[in-house]
Amino acid sequence: MDIRNLLIGKEICECSMAHKCPIDHVIIGEDACSSLPSITKEYSSILLVADRNTYRVCGEEVHNIIKEKISDVLIYQTDSILVPDEVAIDELEGKVTDATDLIIGIGSGVINDLCKIVSFKKGLRYFIVATAPSMDGYASRGSALILDGMKVTLNADVPKAIIADTKVLANAPFEMIQAGYGDIIGKYSCLNDWRLSACVYNEYLCPFVMNATYETVKKTVKLADGIREKDAEAIGALMEALVAVGILMAYVDSSRPASGSEHHLSHYFEIVGIERGEDYLPHGIDVCFSAIETAKVREKLLAIDDISAYEYSFDRADYESNIRRIYGSIADEVIALQNKMRWYDIDRVSIYKEKWAEIKAILSDCPTSAEMLALCERVGLNYADFTSLYGEEKIADALLYAKDLKDRYSVLWMNYDLK
Ligand SMILES: [Zn+2]
Ligand SMILES: [Zn+2]
């Protein structure tokens, strides 16, 4: 799907929703930052936001290109990973004045999420100058934050411009490039979840957005060799795919086309890692490996011989003790979310029995775990890095309880219901 076509929007869609994406500029190419003077014409008091690394990589260049328009610069000084939490949000909010008329973020995931939420809260526009093709949130409305220790995605707004110099992207740490590829490859899993939820829960599904996302994933698979060789053209095409997926999320005002069970697993590893002070992998890499795990779950479910032998049952005491064991200090929030959803009160097993043939057809229309593994390995990702970091118990817990962090149905619920 060509980005220019996606930027136009789709007023009339078969899903009966009008799809819009108010991004004015997507400029991906060599020397993309030279476009800044012309696209910042209407602004005169710009707040530039970077961290030490992204300022060095391309923030300084941006600063020099539009020097007379920059009124202030925030360079996050953290030595470890910048976390998009209350502290980082306050720091950025404290830099916005009555005169600020635009925020320009220089970075990738975290800087983008911070600029997105703060510009939205302050009623400002923001641009993002991407430093790595590492995730698909550049063009989406959702801002992924960690508030009160929980991973939450708040609805904000899209950037007015996305600028990415392919030379900068190709020089990003290779792990970040692998992560971007992984974030896209994981869509095989979440698109399957979306279809599953449409079947089990009659959830809204836009066939146009679904097909356009599939098309983007298939195009990205073809880029794998070029990505491994850090070919600037392939990296630029990967960036376009990441932006396209973001726009498709904005089209349906939800991360549904891009985030399902594989993302819930990756969020679990991140949240539990932060809570326990344990290591976790970069987002898109976790997503890619987690999609191997969710493919295994689908295979396990497809191997069920007799669905009529299953009955719905729920042991609340056992459930709560597991949530407390796994989530520690954030267990109350996890339990409160699920109490609000009341999904444990629903007998889904009866629905599965009734629609089993249709469900099996959906579950089997997804790459197998062996195919997902091969897709990871094509860009040099080693599955053993994932299994040895987390270990069997943490992965088994994730497959049963990562779903509880979210208010979204996926194959993980089916895995729990039919355990
Ligand atoms: Zn639609
Ligand atoms: Zn993602």
Image (tube, rainbow, N blue to C red):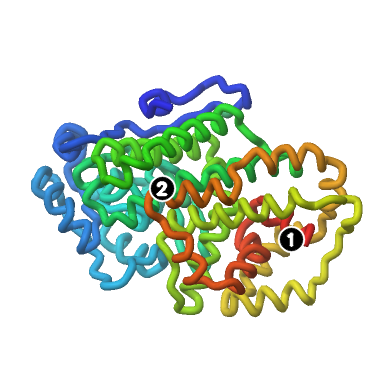
For label 2, the residue is: 378
Q: Quadrant of residue 127?
A: top left
Rendered view: 5 above or below 348: above
Q: Residue at x 45, y 78 (%)?
A: 277
Horizontal and vertical percent position of residue 276: 50, 79
Q: Is residue 56 left or right of residue 125?
A: left
Q: Element under label 1?
A: helix
Work out whether residue 149 can be spotted. Answer: no
Q: Residue at x 82, y 55 (%)?
A: 346
Neighbourhood count class around disc 2 (C-alpha, 10 Å): few under 14, some 14–19, many 20 upward: some
Q: Quadrant of the C terminus?
A: bottom right
Q: Quadrant of the N terminus?
A: top left
Q: Which mark is residue 416?
A: 1
Horizontal and vertical percent position of residue 257: 55, 41
Mark 1 and mark 2 residues within 8 Å of each other at the beta carbon: no
Q: Amino acid at mark 2?
A: Arg
Work out whether residue 157 can be spotted. Answer: yes
